[in-house]
C-alpha cells in the first residue's frame, strides 16, 4: 500500500473535528521544527519537592542471581529485544540504530519523522523498545539489591548516553508521545531505586529531560480516532512524573490534566463488564497494568482515584481470570506486542504477565480467586508491594465457591461454555462475538467474529494463532489478523472486515449474540455477523455452538444465508503440539494428553497446512516477531443459496489416533 493510499484511507475514517485537530497538530509540528513552542530552557526545579516512591525497594532475603546475571549481560552489551536474544548491541548502544536491520534513523524533528516508513527508520518496534528504558530499571534494581557501584555507574552511563544521542526534540524517540510516557514510568522507578547514587550533574540533566518529556506529552496527546491505549499510556507517564517530580509550576497542571484523563479514559476505554474495547487481550493486560501502576503511585502520594475507576480495574481482572484456563493459558485474541510497562522480575524468568497481573490484583483487592489463578507470588509483585508476603499469606485459599467463572461478558462480546473449570477435567470454550475493535480505525482488532478457542484440562487444542508482525512484513501482518487465521468461516476468500492499513480497518463486521445458555449438561451459544453483507450477493453468517458435557462433544452449525453461489472455507487452528491425520471427512488430532475427532461432510476432505508460505497457513506466533509451524485444517467447498454446515468435535482423553 502506498503512503498516499494509506493517507486517503485514514482520512475516510476521520470526522470534521478530527481533521481540524490534525491540521492544528500539523501547524504545531511545523512550528516546533523551527524552534517555536519548545521547552529548550526548562525552569529551575524545586529540589525539595520530590514525591514519595511507589516501589517497595529490594525484597529482603532473596536470591538475586538471575537479576545480577541479567545486569551483567547488559553491561557486557548483550540485549534481549523481541526475537533478538543476547544481541551484541554494545553498552551503551547506538540509540538511533535499529538493532534488527541496522538502519540509522535520521536526526530530524521527532514529530515530523514518518516512523511507519521502514526504509527511513527500520523496524520501529525494535528501535523504540530499548529506549523505553526497562533495562535502566534492571541496573537500578541490581544496584539496590547488591550495593555494587558498577551497576549504578552502568545506569548513569546508559541514561547519559541516551540524553546525548537523543537530544530534545530530535530523532525518532521524540516521534510518539506514548514512548515518552513509558520512558517516564521507567525513569521514575529507576530514580526511586537509585536514590543517593544520582549525583548532582546526573540529577540536573535528568530533571531537565523529565520537564521536556512532560511538556512534549502535554502538547502531543493522542486524540480522536487515535485515543486508545496510547492516550492512557501518555497520561500514565505524565501523571507518574508529576507525582515523582512535582518540581515546576506546571507540575500541578500536568497532574490535574493527567489524573482527569486517566479517570475519563479508564472508564471510556473499558466496558462495564471489564472488557477492554480494543478487543485485544494483550492490550487489555497493558491497560490494566497502566491503571494498576498509576493507582500505586497515587496511593503512595496521598492521591486517590474514584471507586468506579478501581471497580473497573477489578472487573478487568475478573475478565482476565475467566479467560485463563487451568494451566494459565489465555487466548491470543487480537493484537499483541509483548510490551511491558515496568519489568521488575528478571526478563528471562519472570512470571507470565497475566498471572503476575492477577497476583497484583489479588494483593490489591484481597481476592482469593485471583490468588488461585495467579498461583504464586512473583518477583515483580515483591518489588511493587512492601508487605507483599504478609498480604499474600493473609488472602485465604479459594474455597469451593461458585461453580465456575463468569460465563458472559455481553458488552465486550465474549462468552464461555465448558465444565469442571480450573481442574484436570476442565473444558473451556471462549467465543468471540464482540466488535472488531475500538474507535473508527479499530487498530488492534482482528477479523475473528464468531471464532472460538478450546482447551481441555489446561491443554490448548483450538487456538487463536496470535499476531507476529506490526509495521513491517505486510503479508504476514495481514495474514495473522485475517479471517483465515481464525477458527471461523471465510467467504469468497475475503476477510469479514476490510483492511485499510497496518492499524486500520475500513468496512467492519458487526457481531451480535443471539442466545447464550451456559449452564447444564447441554450448553448453547448462537450469534451472527454481517461482514459478508457487503458482497454482491450478500451473505449473513450465523453460528451456533452446542457443548454436551455428558458426551464431551461440541456441535458447530454455520448457517450461511444467501441466494447465489459462494466459495466457503472453514479454518481450524491447532496448538503447535498437536499432530493431525485425516480419514476421509474426519480429522484426528492428537495432543499431549488430549485428543479431538472432528467430522464435517462439507466440501472435500480437509486440507492440512503446517508452516506453509504458499499460501500462508499453519502458523502460530507466541511472541512478537517470532513464529513457528502448527497445524491448520481447512474444509472448503461451494454453496448454492442458504446452507448449513455442521462440524462435530469430540473431545477425547488420550490420543484420538
Image (spheres, grey):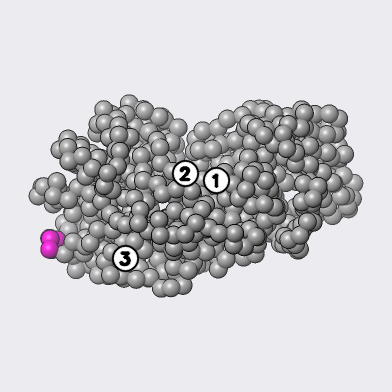
- Tell me the crowding category of disc 2: few under 14, some 14 to 19, or many 20 or more residues within 10 angstroms, Cα based: few
- Tell me the crowding category of disc 1: few under 14, some 14 to 19, or many 20 or more residues within 10 angstroms, Cα based: some
Q: Secondary structure at mark 1?
A: loop
Mark 2 / mark 1, whichever is N-terminal: 1
Residue 105 position by quadrant: top left
Q: Quadrant of the N terminus?
A: top right
Q: Which residue is mark 3?
A: 298
Residue 290 rendering spot, x and y as whole percentages: 40, 57
Residue 392 rendering spot, x and y as whole percentages: 40, 56
Asked if the residue at tag 1 contacts the one at tag 2, i.e. Cβ–Cβ closer than 8 Å, the answer is: yes
Residue at the (19%, 47%) spot, across then down: 194
- Distance CA(mark 1)–CA(mark 3): 30 Å
Asked if the residue at tag 3 contacts the one at tag 2, i.e. Cβ–Cβ closer than 8 Å, the answer is: no
Q: Which residue is mark 2?
A: 352
Is there any visible trace of residue 168 in the rendered image?
no
Q: Secondary structure at mark 2?
A: loop
- Distance CA(mark 2)–CA(mark 3): 26 Å
Is 640 one of the magenta-colored residues?
no
Q: Which residues are magenta?
A: 44-48
Is there any visible trace of residue 243 in the rendered image?
yes
Q: Main secondary structure of the magenta part?
A: loop
Q: Secondary structure at mark 3?
A: helix
Residue found at the far left of this picture: 200
Is 45 one of the magenta-colored residues?
yes
Mark 2 / mark 3, whichever is N-terminal: 3
Q: Which residue is mark 1?
A: 328
Residue at the (63%, 40%) spot, across then down: 459
Residue 172 position by quadrant: top left
Nearer the viewer's eye, disc 1 or disc 3? Answer: 1
Amino acid at each position: 500500500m502506498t503512503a498516499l493510499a494509506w493517507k486517503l484511507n485514514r482520512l475516510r475514517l476521520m470526522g470534521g473535528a478530527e481533521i481540524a485537530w490534525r491540521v492544528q497538530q500539523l501547524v504545531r509540528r511545523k512550528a516546533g521544527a523551527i524552534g517555536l513552542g519548545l521547552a529548550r530552557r526548562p525552569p529551575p526545579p524545586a529540589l525539595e519537592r520530590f514525591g514519595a516512591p511507589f516501589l517497595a525497594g529490594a525484597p529482603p532475603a532473596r536470591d538475586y542471581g538471575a537479576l545480577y546475571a541479567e545486569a551483567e549481560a547488559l553491561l557486557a552489551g548483550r540485549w534481549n529485544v523481541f526475537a533478538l536474544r543476547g544481541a551484541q548491541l554494545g553498552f551503551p548502544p547506538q540509540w538511533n540504530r535499529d538493532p534488527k536491520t541496522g538502519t540509522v534513523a535520521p536526526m530530524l524533528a521527532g514529530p515530523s519523522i514518518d516512523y511507519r516508513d521502514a526504509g527511513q527508520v527500520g523496524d520501529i518496534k525494535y528501535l523504540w523498545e530499548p529506549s523505553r528504558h526497562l533495562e535502566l530499571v534492571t541496573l537500578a534494581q541490581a544496584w539496590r539489591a547488591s550495593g555494587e557501584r558498577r551497576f549504578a555507574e552502568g545506569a548513569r552511563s546508559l541514561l547519559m548516553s541516551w540524553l546525548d544521542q537523543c537530544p530534545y526534540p530530535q530523532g525518532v524517540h521524540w516521534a510518539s508521545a506514548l514512548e515518552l510516557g513509558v520512558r517516564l514510568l521507567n525513569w521514575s522507578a529507576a530514580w526511586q531505586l537509585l536514590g543517593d547514587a544520582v549525583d548532582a550533574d546526573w540529577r540536573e540533566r535528568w530533571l531537565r529531560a523529565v520537564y521536556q518529556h512532560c511538556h512534549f506529552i502535554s502538547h502531543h496527546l493522542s486524540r480522536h480516532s487515535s485515543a486508545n491505549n496510547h492516550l492512557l499510556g501518555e497520561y500514565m507517564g505524565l501523571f507518574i512524573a508529576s507525582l515523582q517530580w512535582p518540581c515546576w509550576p506546571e507540575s500541578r497542571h500536568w497532574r490535574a490534566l493527567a489524573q482527569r484523563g486517566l479517570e475519563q479514559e479508564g472508564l471510556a476505554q473499558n466496558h462495564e463488564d471489564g472488557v477492554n474495547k480494543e478487543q485485544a487481550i494483550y492490550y487489555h493486560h497493558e491497560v490494566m497494568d497502566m491503571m494498576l501502576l498509576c493507582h500505586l503511585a497515587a496511593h503512595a502520594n496521598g492521591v486517590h482515584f474514584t471507586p468506579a475507576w478501581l471497580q473497573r480495574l477489578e472487573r478487568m481482572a475478573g475478565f482476565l481470570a475467566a479467560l485463563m484456563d487451568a494451566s494459565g493459558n489465555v487466548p491470543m485474541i487480537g493484537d499483541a506486542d509483548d510490551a511491558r510497562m515496568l519489568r521488575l522480575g528478571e526478563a528471562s524468568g519472570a512470571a507470565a504477565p497475566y498471572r503476575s497481573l492477577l497476583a497484583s490484583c489479588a494483593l490489591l483487592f484481597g481476592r482469593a480467586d485471583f490468588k488461585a489463578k495467579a498461583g504464586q507470588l512473583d518477583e515483580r509483585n515483591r518489588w511493587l508491594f512492601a508487605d507483599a508476603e504478609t498480604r499474600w499469606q493473609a488472602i485465604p485459599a479459594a474455597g469451593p465457591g461458585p461453580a465456575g467463572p463468569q460465563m458472559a461478558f455481553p458488552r465486550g462480546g465474549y462468552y464461555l461454555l465448558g465444565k469442571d473449570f480450573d481442574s484436570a477435567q476442565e473444558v473451556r470454550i471462549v467465543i468471540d462475538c464482540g466488535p472488531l475493535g475500538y474507535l473508527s480505525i479499530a487498530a488492534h482488532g482482528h477479523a475473528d467474529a464468531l471464532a472460538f478457542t478450546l482447551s481441555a484440562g489446561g491443554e490448548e487444542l483450538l487456538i487463536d494463532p496470535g499476531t507476529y508482525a506490526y509495521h513491517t512484513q505486510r503479508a504476514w501482518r495481514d495474514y495473522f489478523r485475517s479471517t483465515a487465521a481464525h477458527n471461523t468461516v471465510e467467504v469468497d476468500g475475503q476477510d469479514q472486515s476490510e483492511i485499510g492499513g497496518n492499524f486500520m480497518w475500513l468496512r467492519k463486521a458487526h457481531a451480535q449474540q443471539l442466545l447464550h445458555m451456559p449452564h447444564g449438561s447441554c450448553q448453547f451459544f448462537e450469534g451472527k455477523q454481517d461482514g459478508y453483507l457487503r458482497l454482491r450477493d450478500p451473505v449473513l453468517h450465523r453460528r451456533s455452538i452446542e457443548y454436551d458435557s455428558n458426551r464431551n462433544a461440541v456441535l458447530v452449525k454455520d448457517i450461511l444465508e444467501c441466494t447465489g453461489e459462494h466459495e466457503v472455507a472453514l479454518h481450524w487452528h491447532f496448538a503447535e503440539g498437536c499432530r493431525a491425520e485425516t480419514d476421509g471427512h474426519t480429522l484426528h488430532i492428537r495432543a499431549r494428553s488430549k485428543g479431538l475427532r472432528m467430522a464435517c461432510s462439507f466440501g472435500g476432505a480437509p486440507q492440512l497446512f503446517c508452516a506453509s508460505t504458499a499460501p500462508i497457513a499453519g502458523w502460530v506466533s507466541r511472541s512478537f516477531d517470532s513464529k513457528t509451524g502448527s497445524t491448520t485444517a481447512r474444509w472448503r467447498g461451494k454453496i448454492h443459496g442458504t446452507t448449513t454446515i455442521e462440524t462435530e468435535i469430540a473431545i477425547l482423553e488420550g490420543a484420538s489416533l
